[in-house]
């Protein structure tokens, strides 16, 4: 089975921190997924603030096997910040769905519910979402074929 993995890093970082006070274990995820098939596409999407701790994390993701996609952090004049990868993840997911048997999305963002519904309708691609149940949108949970609860086995 060919697998594509797309990770909304910001979403996973904040939901695992808020729910568990811990970080997500990407190496454990990679190990679990590689037991199910061949990971042929693996992309992780992040906002780049350019700090040393973040660069160390990004290097670790690359070492595991992820293609890291970065956008610069943008601070608006009113003090708010901008930076999300929803459109980029959507484009890559639609492209990947035609090449794989299973699309794995790590996010709790309900904006991806329409994306997964479209993938299921257009492609014969199984969709899996990993998320923190209490912090994942109901629409997203209902739109995928399988929802995997992030629990202690996927935390560090």
Image (cartoon, grey):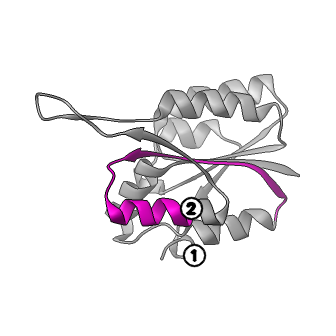
Q: Which residue was labeled with disc 1?
A: 153
Q: CA distance from mark 1 to mark 2?
A: 18 Å
Q: For the residue labelled by badge 2, is the local secondary structure a helix, a strand or a loop?
A: helix
**Could you tell which of marks 1 and 2 lies nearer the N-terminus?**
2
Q: Which percent across, then down, holds residue 115?
A: 61, 28
Query: 139 or 77: which is nearer to us?
Result: 77
The image shows residue 109, relative to residue 49, as above or below, that is above
Horizontal arrangement in the rendering, residue 122 relative to residue 45 (left or right): right
The image shows residue 13, relative to residue 152, as above or below, that is above
Q: Which residues are magenta?
A: 36-61
Mark 1 is surrounded, within 10 Å at the Cα level, by few (under 14), some (14 to 19) or many (20 or more) other residues, namely few
The image shows residue 15, relative to residue 108, as above or below, that is below
Kindly give the residue lying farthest to the right in the view shown. Answer: 1
Q: Which percent across, then down, holds residue 70?
A: 47, 42
The answer to whether residue 47 is magenta is: yes
Kindly give the residue lying farthest to the left in the view shown. Answer: 78
Tell me if I can see residue 84 in this picture: yes
Horizontal arrangement in the rendering, residue 64 relative to residue 74 (left or right): right
The answer to whether residue 42 is magenta is: yes
Q: Which residue was labeled with disc 2?
A: 61
Q: Which percent across, then down, holds residue 133?
A: 48, 55
Q: Which quarter of the picture shows residue 65?
A: bottom right
Q: Residue at coordinates 56% horizontally, 61% vertically from top-left?
A: 61
Tell me if I can see residue 150 in this picture: no
Query: 71 or 28: which is nearer to us?
Result: 71
Mark 2 is surrounded, within 10 Å at the Cα level, by few (under 14), some (14 to 19) or many (20 or more) other residues, namely some
Q: For the residue labelled by badge 1, is the local secondary structure a helix, a strand or a loop?
A: helix
Q: Residue at coordinates 38% horizontally, 70% vertically from top-left?
A: 20
Q: Do callouts 1 and 2 mark residues in contact (Cβ within 8 Å)?
A: no
Q: Which percent across, then down, holds residue 30?
A: 68, 65
Horizontal arrangement in the rendering, residue 130 relative to residue 52 (left or right): right
């Amino acid at each position: 089975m060919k697998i594509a993995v797309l990770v909304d890093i910001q979403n996973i970082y904040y939901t695992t921190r808020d729910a568990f006070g811990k970080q997500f274990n990407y190496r454990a995820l990679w190990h679990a997924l590689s037991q199910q098939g061949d990971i042929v596409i693996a992309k992780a999407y992040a906002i780049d603030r350019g700090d040393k701790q973040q660069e160390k994390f990004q290097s670790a993701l690359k070492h595991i096997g992820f293609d890291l996609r970065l956008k610069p952090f943008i601070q608006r004049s009113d003090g708010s910040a901008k930076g999300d990868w929803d459109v980029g993840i959507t484009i890559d997911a639609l492209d990947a769905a035609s090449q794989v048997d299973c699309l794995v999305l790590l996010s709790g963002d309900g904006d991806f519910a329409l994306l997964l519904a479209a993938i299921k309708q257009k492609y014969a691609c199984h969709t899996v979402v990993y998320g923190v149940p209490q912090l994942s949108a109901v629409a997203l949970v209902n739109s995928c074929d399988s929802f995997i609860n992030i629990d202690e086995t996927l935390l560090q």
